[in-house]
Amino acid sequence: MPLSRTFQALAEPNRQKILDLLKAGELSVSEILKHFNVTMPTLSHHLDILKRADLISSRREGQQIIYSLNLSAFEEITEQIIKFLSLKN
Amino acid sequence: MPLSRTFQALAEPNRQKILDLLKAGELSVSEILKHFNVTMPTLSHHLDILKRADLISSRREGQQIIYSLNLSAFEEITEQIIKFLSLKN
DNA sequence: TTGATAGTTAGATGAACATCTAAATAATAA
DNA sequence: TTATTATTTAGATGTTCATCTAACTATCAA
């Protein structure tokens, strides 16, 4: 997973907010949607980008799809970013 | 300085490489240019974006303009990113 | 099955972005 | 003052991106 895709995923304010929401616990799309002023397709698109960046994951539960932080990947990504930002080599 | 601007600046591979080069020490535009396959105006544009994100700074030295990492801002930004990525509140 | 609910996918549109060439600015050298 | 060198700014172009509406898919309930 290239670092640029991670940064790009993190660069959009709505997506930052999605991550913040999911830090508190998993949520369905409709539940997430309540916190935004975009249509569901737009939200779905943002979720897709976060998923492709491996930051979140999803599972179906009946009619709903539940999104949650991808915790293990999150740690790895944090490591990678810290390493990139560090001045030493 | 919004976090989104930082992430956006970091999202472009050429800009990541510029930062990596500058970690080793300050460089003029022409020196930086040697490491890339873009024209000077394009490089100038990337430098501008990094500068607006407060990641680097520049000073004139004769005919040349010397770019360097903005170390203090760099630390602050690293802090901010780590805080954003942290799960606790 | 048929209808309702929850989401995604497709296609269109305007804005932002990376890139280029050409022109402008700034500093030095002749 | 006139070239030359170093860099930025302006303007154009193709691509990526965020957003929308409309259409599709999947699950559940009647």
Image: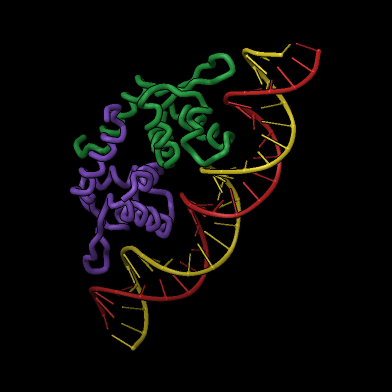
Chain colours: A purple, B green, C yellow, D red
Comparing A17 with D14, the one in front is: D14
Q: Residue at x 40, y 37 (%)?
A: B16
From the viewer's perspective, is residue B13 above or below residue D6?
A: below
Image x and y of residue C6, in percent: 31, 64
From the viewer's perspective, is residue A65 above or below residue D11?
A: below
Image x and y of residue A5, in percent: 37, 48
Q: Residue at x 25, y 56 (%)?
A: A57
Image x and y of residue B62, in percent: 57, 14
Comparing B57 with C22, the one in front is: C22
From where the camera sits, is residue A14 visible?
no
Image x and y of residue B82, in percent: 26, 33
- Please state, as top left, top right, bottom left or bottom right, where the N terminus of chain B lies in the image: top left
- Please state, as top left, top right, bottom left or bottom right, where the C terminus of chain B lies in the image: top left
Marker count (numbered):
0
Residue D14 lies in quadrant: bottom right
In-image side of C25 versus B48 (left or right): right
Comparing D2 with B69, the one in front is: D2
Q: Which residue is drawn at 23% across and 45% down?
A: A74
From where the camera sits, is residue A7 visible?
yes
In-image side of A70 versus B26 (left or right): left
Q: Residue at x 27, y 27 (%)?
A: A88
